Image (spheres, coloured by chain):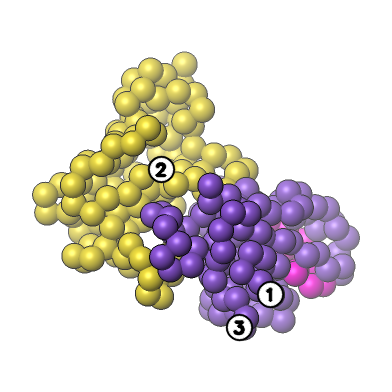
Chain colours: A yellow, B purple
Amino acid sequence: DAKTTQPTSMDCAEGRAANLPCNHSTISGNEYVYWYRQIHSQGPQYIIHGLKNNETNEMASLIITEDRKSSTLILPHATLRDTAVYYCIVRVASGGSYIPTFGRGTSLIVHP
Amino acid sequence: GAVVSQHPSWVICKSGTSVKIECRSLDFQATTMFWYRQFPKQSLMLMATSNEGSKATYEQGVEKDKFLINHASLTLSTLTVTSAHPEDSSFYICSARPLEGGGYYYEQYFGPGTRLTVT
């Protein structure tokens, strides 16, 4: 799996958009970008994933650059409950013998 | 759908005793389950990959005789920490991967974690 680089921490005001970047310059053509988050003392939660097109769901939007070397997770209206560690992972979408590994992620703090 | 449970959610045990943690996929079948360990302020570290009906594959540095994994059915995997010591105190998280063609797009679902404290 391609290595990812994320800022260690970020903060955001409640109600504003939180934009979390991720660099994955060695991503392969068949690797997807996945985002998970982990609220303190809980298991990771899936947020969104994409291959090359921008994606949106009820939780967030994912913007992937045209060269696919980086992406941004957008929480459009951050709330205090969005305070968590956000992990960006790149891996093949299905099957195979991939090993799901996590980097350090970005600790997002949403403040009032 | 795609819920993974863990039991217990927290446990306190004395040094030298063994502790069993269960991971269940509640509404899907999983041929593969993963066990992670997470120390405070650190990321998840993969310990082992558990495949139904076969021996688990352990990551480098993880003692297979200390962390016994059994994946006896398509919905249950157990992690037993044998002869636990205070340094084994950690947050243990499992995840499950559905059968191929199971229809779930995300392919890895996480349990809520088990907090183990060894005194």
- Secondary structure, mark 2, is strand
Q: CA distance from mark 3 to mark 2?
A: 31 Å
Q: CA distance from mark 1 to mark 3?
A: 9 Å
**Which mark's residue is nearer the viewer, 2 or 1?**
1
Three-letter amino acid code at disc 2?
Ile
Tell me: residue A85, above or below residue A4: above
- Magenta region, residue range: B80-93
Which residue is the site of mark 3?
Answer: B54
What x and y, as percent, mark residue B5? 65, 52
What x and y, as percent, mark residue B55? 62, 83
Which residue is the site of mark 1?
Answer: B72
**Which mark's residue is nearer the viewer, 3 or 2?**
3
- Secondary structure, mark 1, is strand
Q: Can you see residue B42? A: no
What residue is at 47 percent from the left and 16 percent from the top? A112
Residue B30 belongs to magenta span: no
Three-letter amino acid code at disc 3?
Ser
Q: Callout 1: residue from which chain?
A: B
Three-letter amino acid code at disc 1?
Ala
Q: Can you see residue A21? A: yes
What residue is at 86 percent from the left and 64 percent from the top? B15
Residue nearest the viewer, comparing B119 with A28: A28
Tell me: residue B113, above or below residue B23: above
Q: Earlier in the sequence, mark 1 or mark 3?
A: 3
Which residue is the site of mark 2?
Answer: A47
What x and y, as percent, mark residue B12? 83, 53
Residue B92 belongs to magenta span: yes
